[in-house]
Image: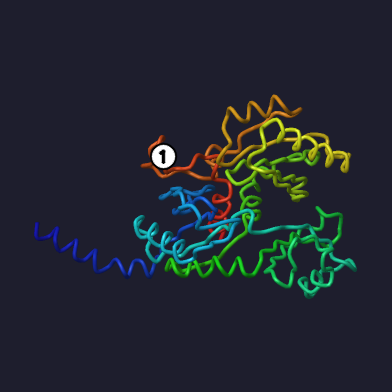
Amino acid sequence: MVLSGVQEQLQDRLAPLRSWLFPSRAFLELEDRSITLLAGQRSGGSFQAEVLERVPLPAGLCDRGEPLRQEAVGDFIGDLLIERGLNGAHVRACLPAVASQWKLVQWPGGAWPADPEEVLIRRGADSGFSFPIKAAYTREIPLDINLTGGTPTSLVVAVRQSLLEAWIETLAIAGVALDGVEAAQVCGLRALEPLLRQAPASQMLAVLSLQAEASRLLLVRRGLPLYEQAYPADDGLADLAEQVRRCIDFNLQQDSSATSVRLLLHGAKATGAVAEQLGGLLPWSVELLDPVAEGWLRLPPDLEPDDPVAPAGVELLRITGLALAEAAR
């Protein structure tokens, strides 16, 4: 008994030192209606989750990707991390999908610009973003020129400065050590990399996200994102299927070398029954995209299969991509 008490005291004293030497890592997927929390570490070619939970946010705290009541949201996140033993964790966060926009930008003059943001500002509305670049933070990701026909091209991701700063302030209120914030689109593309590497050059990958807020269709070809379109969440399946069919058909007409389509479904409203229904309405089969089934993310060993707070595998694409960025470091 005495020895046990001494060991417990020693562990308590060493806990702050262990947390300083080996800080906890946590990943947050931020959405208007919920927060998804993931913590764990890389294990071989996948990410082993130790904590995985989706917690509903009280109504009215966030809207259209922006935290309206920063103190309340920050306190909510801070309490969640403390309750899960992640107080003081180093955090990377994925912004809501509606918070950011992306475009493929071909740079003029056949060369990479010294100041990409200045080029975008000069283009103004022609840059294709719905808000002025001067009022945004941008990230330019150079793409392989072998995939872009030799033309210097970047994937440019933009988020309004006020919105990004609001989330950074909110996470500061939560008391976390913020290691970075990423766009949902970047996280999703990163998670898709294993499939993109395997995809035939003639295949167009269509990724349909069914979320509570909206549905989004992303088209990818030869590893390059081509097009993204959002649809209202209240569209019926028949209407959604018709809009998706028109979008894919149009893009196939623009690229005659694309001869096949692989349609993948994920998100909070994606189920086997929905995939089967959509498959009956579209000329292509519909597959569920599940990072857990693919082996990219491994669930916590003690997670109960029917645990109501654990999101289904089809809901975990973006946070998987967020965690894989850390695993690759």
Image location of residue 1, percent across then percent down: 9, 56
Q: How many badges with numbers are in the image?
A: 1
Vertical placement of residue 154 versus 225, above or below? below
Say whether residue 274 is visible: yes
Q: Is mark 1 on a helix, strand or loop?
A: loop
Q: Residue furthest front?
A: 60
Say whether residue 37 is visible: no
Taking the spot 46% from the left edge, 49% from the top edge, the residue there is 56
Image location of residue 268, percent across then percent down: 55, 41
Taking the spot 74% from the left edge, 29% from the top edge, the residue there is 284
Q: Left or right: 85 with respect to 174?
A: left
- Amino acid beneath label 1: Pro
The residue that label 1 is drawn on is 308
Q: Left or right: 14 with respect to 79?
A: left
Q: Where on the picture, by quarter, is residue 240?
A: top right
Image location of residue 175, percent across then percent down: 42, 68
Image location of residue 127, percent across then percent down: 81, 63
> Quarter of the image containing the C terminus?
bottom right
Vertical placement of residue 42 versus 69, above or below? above
Q: Left or right: 260 with respect to 175?
A: right
